[in-house]
Image (cartoon, grey):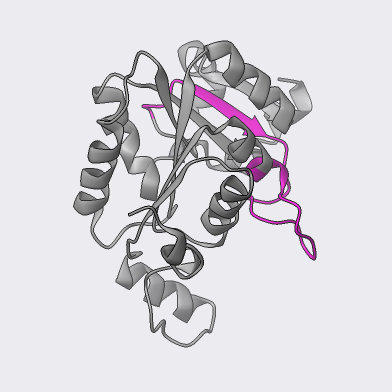
Amino acid sequence: MNKSFVEGLKPSRLFTDPEEMRRVVGWTMKAEDAFLFFKKLQKRAISLFGYSSPYEDEGSMLKIVREELSRFSPETHLVNIGATMGGIGAAYPLAKSMGFLTTGIVSSLATQYADQVSADVAHICFIADTSWGGKLPNSDALAPTSQAMVACTDIFIGIGGGEITRDELRAGQALGKPVTFHPAEVNHEWARKRAEKNNQPPPTSFWGPAHAALIGNSEK
């Protein structure tokens, strides 16, 4: 890391503890850099997509994750998520306990929230990006973080999710990669508070944008 980049970060063990820093593959990577790193790992990447916010039923989400991962061998597959511990990131400890190597791809914006990075992700790729992912404004092209997620993923498993999950799963489908989608609701209280904070009307559905776009194409 260069000095100017470090000075702009909030204090965190991820930036000061040598053991923690060894987990970071790169701080401002390009999508192609992440792709090359994943290739070196010589395992097929199973990526889990979903909400970054809490699930209404986290237990059911984790049950789906266990059932899905049980179909694969840790010897030949790794589990990739978005590096942070919230939402779908709660699956990191489970994936690790099942013997899978864990990786995370996340926007460089997350360096400002390093305390939210999961302790159970072995390799973290921070992608140089001014957004959290999804499509670029007024474009069908994906933002760098989503480009990296799609490029590095061999098997897509979605469990609920918002716009970014929707865009990434659709991109996976367009490339002919295997995509499985499971409906799941975002936490109701969280969704209501978010709407109130943003001066929006109360939500009438908690299934998320990915559900509306993908449930008709689900393999389940």
Counting from the top left corner in percent of width and height, residue 102 is at 41, 24
Tell me, yes or no, whether the highlighted magenta stretch contains residue 107.
no
Q: Is residue 17 above or below residue 120?
A: above
Q: Is residue 63 left or right of residue 44?
A: left
Q: On the rendered structure, is 46 left or right of 62?
A: right
Quadrant for residue 187, please give it: bottom left
Locate the C terminus by quadrant: bottom left
Please tell me which residue lies in front, 55 or 14. Answer: 55
The answer to whether one can see residue 150 in this image is yes
Q: Taking 83 as reference, is 184 above or below it?
A: below
**Residue 38 spot, x, y in % from top left:** 58, 20
Q: Position of residue 132 (x, y in %)?
A: 62, 50
| 102 lies left or right of 189 | right
Q: Nearer the viewer, residue 73 or 110?
A: 73
Q: In the image, what residue occupies the spot 53% across and 42% down? A: 113
* Residue drawn where x is 46% and y is 81% of the image: 196
Instruction: Give the extent of the magenta segment.
Output: 119-146
User: Up-down: is 98 above or below 205?
Assistant: above
Q: Is residue 61 left or right of residue 173?
A: left
Classify the position of the N terminus by image quarter.
top right
Residue 51 in which image quadrant: bottom left
Residue sitting at x 59%, y 28%:
125
Who is closer to the viewer here, 210 or 5?
210
Q: Position of residue 121 (x, y in %)?
A: 42, 26
* Magenta stretch, main secondary structure class: loop
Q: Which residue is painted at 39% across and 58% down in the image?
A: 160
Give the vertical position of 187 relative to 126 (above or below): below
